[in-house]
Amino acid sequence: MYNNIHGTARMVMENAIQRLWLKDNLILALGICPLLGGVSTFGAAVVMAIIFALTMIMMALVLSLIRHLIPVALRAAMILACAATVVTILHLLMQTFFYEYSRITGMYSYLVAVSCLLLVFAEEEWLSGPVPAALKQAILLSTGVCILLVLIGIVREYIPLHLLHQAPGAFLLLAFVIAGAQWFAARGKQISSVSA
């Protein structure tokens, strides 16, 4: 019974890692890089994470609801228009109700609209599946990205290393996180092959 529970827990963990890393680190890195510019502190990371998560969820909902109305030739244009509209609405709401937080991210919040994570998932998942599946995938992906952004924001704010506070510091941290995830995944495969 212990082996069954352990095997199930390991499968859930591997599935979560695959969802978070999209089985392709290049897509993850390219999708998160536009967001890293505004992640210099813990507060900025939380604001960017919330903007990203709300954008993902709202886009998944809207695009999956109107997927039958969008011609194939106009899909890319509709995805970009939807992303830009959602991000603009969120930024205006932040400026109205949470002005200090909108000043933290500044223009970087608009970069969420051109994240290739949104574009890839919109094209492959949200425009081809039902609403519940689209929302589930948006929540899973945005949760993983939010955890990553907040982790990078915490490290950049609280570790007194000058390099981390410069512009390349966030990209260096992202590289370390991806390398750590790869090591963790490889270690899990080694353990599962030894136990089998």
Image (cartoon, helix red, strand yellow):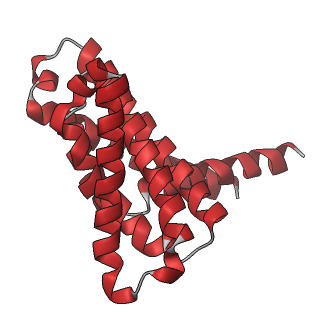
In the rendered image, the residue lying farthest to the front is 96
Q: Nearer the viewer, residue 119 or 158?
A: 119
Q: Is residue 46 left or right of residue 174?
A: right
Does residue 25 show up?
A: no
Does residue 9 show up?
A: yes
Res. 167 image quadrant: top left
Q: Residue at x 25, y 34 (%)?
A: 173
Percent across and percent down for residue 57 are 50, 51
Q: Nearer the viewer, residue 113 or 167?
A: 113
Q: Nearer the viewer, residue 67 or 146?
A: 67
Q: Residue at x 83, y 51 (%)?
A: 4
Percent across and percent down for residue 179 are 33, 45
Percent across and percent down for residue 99 are 28, 22
Seen in the picture, residue 170 relative to 77 is either above or below; the reply is above
Q: Is residue 157 left or right of residue 124?
A: left
Q: Residue at x 43, y 81 (%)?
A: 70
Q: Quadrant of the C terminus?
A: bottom right
Q: Residue at x 40, y 87 (%)?
A: 71
Q: How many numbered circles does the render carry?
A: 0
Percent across and percent down for residue 174 are 27, 40
Seen in the picture, residue 173 relative to 74 is either above or below; the reply is above
